[in-house]
Amino acid sequence: MRKHVLLALASVLIAAFCCQSVPAQLPGGLKIPKLSKPKPTPTPAETTAQPAPSSETRTAAQPSSSAAPPQATAGDTTLVKTRIGFWPETLTSYKGEYNNVWSWIPTVTFVPQGPGLPSGGQYYVEVTQPNGAPWVKLKCVGNADGTGYDCGNSNDLEKEGTLATGVFPFAIKMRNPLEGTDKTLFTGRAKVEKVLSSGNIPPTSKQFVYYTNQDWNLPIGYVFIGNNDNLYVRFWIRGETPGVEAHLFYRGAEVGRFESNGYQYGASRCSPDIEYRPTRDAGAGAPQGAKWARMDCPFQTITTKPNPNNSEWHVISANPGEYEVKVLRNKRLARVLKFSIGSDGQIVDNGIASGNGMAGDNFIFVPVLVVGDLDGVWDRNAWKTDAFYGHALKGFTWPPQ
């Protein structure tokens, strides 16, 4: 009996020893690895949460582009074409060497709409040289205010800087390794120019500041009703932005303008909502400092609904017909644009925004008459080919008649 007990104990000890020293095996020799405590994995910057839509994308517009396949289809993420930007970052080096030669690398910004990034998805941008040769890929991260994405990093691309100028093609893409997809969301082209920073004398004769020519924006204006039921207009200027104000006229008379307690109300104080400025001082040789800005002008006394507490406000839904906006810049007439209100109380749709896949809530494009010389000498034909980085507006004509 004692012999059997000792044998049983020996068997238990041998089994325990074997289980600790030899991992379990599956058919074919596959081993089950030991489980370790999982480590937290940081979320990649490229998978930043989808930003809230801007005032230009309150409805599900369907921007389309002529980008090469594969393309995003209906229901996929698309981009707000009016919020795509391409701008050079001027580097005080060339190929990583600091020898008084300045170069540049591209930066791209955009705002998506729709479902946004799927699980595992990443935005990136490919930029090619004017001759079509591959150049750089830009990583995209959510911007600080959560409204869109910024692409490009000088720390990563410093040695890729170029001295070339001209028309640079680029493509904004979204890859998803989990789905095995790589979609092109937008293709465009940007016209990059340069100007000497401080005169053509050594050692600064190779210190150029680079910028994208944005003259195509100047003829294009925007009119829409905001979420607060007030009227908004937007247009572009070249140069500095202070001293810009818009006035609304109906049947030859200014409306929404009144005085109360010694104060005047009604004119819209405009401020930039998009700005393009050189990353280094462009000097006096650059046209208007190589600066462009889209001015946002809210008319706080122009509304679509009567307000019993503000009888002086102008109700456009009750006053159909043609309206005219006149813009003063430093007390000089600088812009004129027109739109109409229909008998239904809504802004009359001229079909340009919807016809180009950029429709929004009563959002329309209108031609803007550029008055005076405050913008300097600018390319008045750029809108025909360069608008929205190579996506000219179908049905748009300029100058306004």
Image (spheres, grey):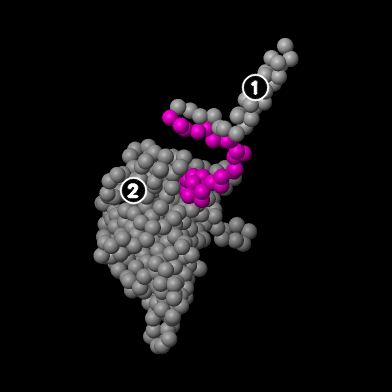
Residue 62 in view of the camera: no
* Within-10-Å neighbours for mark 1: few <14, some 14–19, many 20+: few
> Given the image, on which type of amino acid does mark 2 rest?
Thr
Query: What residue appears at the point 39 percent right and 46 percent down from the top-left corner?
Result: 175
The residue identified by callout 2 is 184
Task: Give the mark, 2 or 1, whose residue is nearer the N terminus.
Answer: 1
Query: What residue appears at the point 58 percent right and 35 percent down from the top-left corner?
Result: 35
* Within-10-Å neighbours for mark 2: few <14, some 14–19, many 20+: many
Residue 244 % position (x, y): 48, 65
Residue 41 in view of the camera: yes
Q: Nearer the viewer, residue 55 or 200?
A: 200
Residue placed furthest toward the top: 1
Left or right: residue 173 compared with residue 280: left
Residue 331 % position (x, y): 47, 70
> Given the image, on which type of amino acid does mark 1 rest?
Ser
Q: Mark 2, mark 1: which one is toward the viewer?
A: 1
Residue 88 % position (x, y): 41, 66
